[in-house]
Image (cartoon, rainbow, N blue to C red):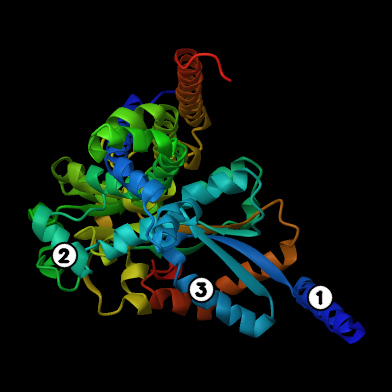
Amino acid sequence: MSINWQAFQLTIELATVVSAILLAIGLPLAYWIAFSRWRWKFFVEAVVALPIVLPPTVLGFYVLVALGSQSPLGRWWQSLTGHTLAFTFTGLVIGSILYSLPFAVQPFAASFSSVDRKLLAASATLGASPVRTFFRVVVPLSVPGLVTGLALAFAHTMGEFGVVLMIGGNIPGVTRTVSIDIYDQVQASNYASANAMALLLLVFCFAVLTVVYGLNRRTLDRRLWTMGPVK
Amino acid sequence: MLRRRFVSLGLIALLVLVPGASKLAEAADREINVAAAADLSSALQEVATNYEKRTGVVVKLSFGASGALTQQIQNGAPFDVFFSADMDYPRQLIAGGQAEGATLYRYAVGRLVLWVPKESPLDVEHKGMEVLLDPTAKKISIANPRHAPYGRAAVAALKHYDLYEKVSDRLVLGENVSQAAQFVESGNAQAGFVALAHASAPAMQGKGKYWIVPDEAYPQLDQGAVLISHSPRQQDAAAFLEYVKTAEVAALLRRYGFSLPEAK
């Protein structure tokens, strides 16, 4: 029985990078979804939600074949970077961003839309720019939603399997994530090692979610406190 | 109103009964479930089709890495026959009481090739293993040696030519030898160790060029088939295994690049 710490570390790195990028992409995207009045907005919302229903094999297949050297897009990427996306950490990051996008963007957007519009109007009347209003009013009021979105994106990436199996190539320290390592151990009938890794992942993901929901509860309490008694 | 209700009732009945009827017919048909090593993916498909035409028994095929299939059978997967890419996995099953020792049969000897896409600058046909030292061979795919016999053969061959240390950081592992082939075919890996059965399959004709790894470079890939003990269809399964022993199937397997026990 042994724990593959390298795979564990790699998986955490992947989830951290993906969550950070999703925060950067997700904030403007969610803001747009929450506040845009464009009539075709539902179209964008459907695209964002797609990865929830698509099997990971579809994403894996596209990253592998559509971005492989047989396709124009893949050749362009290759001429840019010198290698294909498959079998690289970058490839996993791109696959995971697509795969976890709705898990970050949907909670972001939901909490943005629940912000009282009167506060936004007030902020504007006081002369704040939309960007300033966003960071000083919308974001502070949406912290629980942002934390939930980030935690879901992080945990979802930690547990990602299908995409990685299809495009990873199982390279130790580069693309052999915990879920792949567990699968490998089971296929090779090393149940003890599989069990150790599975338990580690289970405990870790549970801990992350507990901390997040615990923090969220505290922020909510504090906000109610600073806002005074609820009428 | 009433008529409309009858029409909709009729439609519902149709929806319920038609799939049900076809399911009944299916149950009446005889079928066997076969677990097979990934290198057989084209060849055994053809064997199964021929067998179905001849006997009416439907052969359902599930392909995977031999080690993975072994693990599934150990955990009660409902297979009737197992075609491994080696002899060790069937022996493991026999030792564990999951397969019938008396039925173990070496149906073919697999051969390993180094495969590159047709348009590749790597001259694999003349230079063989040496092309792996070429810097343009950035990724080299092999089957996962932990549970795929072809992966083990590939590692053995690389070690035989003292190349393993030099290329190990460029190896990517396919879940089984089919995925190793698919990594190269899709252009994501520049070279790969695959089964000759893949390289010579009709679907792959004209897509690549290959070099047959000499026999002395890796332990012979004797491939064994065995009946699964918990199969409820022992008779049909045994009949299929008998068919695999015929000269007709032997010729077909040879056409796919397997060498045959008799020929050895």
Numbered disc in front, either 3 or 2: 2
Residue A125 percent location from the top left of the image:
29, 36
Q: Residue at x 67, y 54 (%)?
A: B78
| Disc 1 residue type (three-letter) | Ile
Between B169 and B233, the residue placed more toward the observer is: B169
Above or below — where is B170 with respect to A114? Answer: below
Circle 2 — which element? helix
Mark 3 vs mark 1: in front: 1
Q: Is B120 left, or right, of B156 in this rendering? A: left
* Mark 3 or mark 1: whose residue is earlier in sequence: 1
Q: Which residue is labeled 1 in the image?
A: B12
Whether labels 3 and 2 belong to a single chain: the reply is no
Report which quarter residue A67 is drawn in: bottom left
Q: Kindly identify the amino acid type of the residue bearing the numbered disc 3.
A: Gln
**Protein chain holding label 2:** A
Q: Residue at x 43, y 55 (%)?
A: A45
Q: CA distance from mark 3 to mark 1?
A: 37 Å
Mark 2 is on which residue type? Arg
User: CA separation, marks 3 and 2?
Assistant: 34 Å
Residue A157 image offset from top left, x and y in percent? 39, 39
In the figure, A177 relative to B177: above or below? above
The residue pinned by badge 3 equals: B45
- Looking at the figure, which quarter contains the C terminus of chain A? top right
> Residue B199's x, y, as percent?
31, 70
Q: Residues within 10 Å of mark 3 (few under 14, many from 20)?
A: some
Q: Which chain letter goes with mark 1?
A: B
Rendering quarter of residue B79: bottom right
Residue beneath the point at 9% across and 68% down: B121
Question: Are the two marked residues, 3 and 2, in contact with CB atoms closer than 8 angstroms?
Answer: no
Neighbours of disc 2 within 10 Å: few (<14), some (14-19), many (20+): some
Tell me the residue that label 2 is attached to: A75
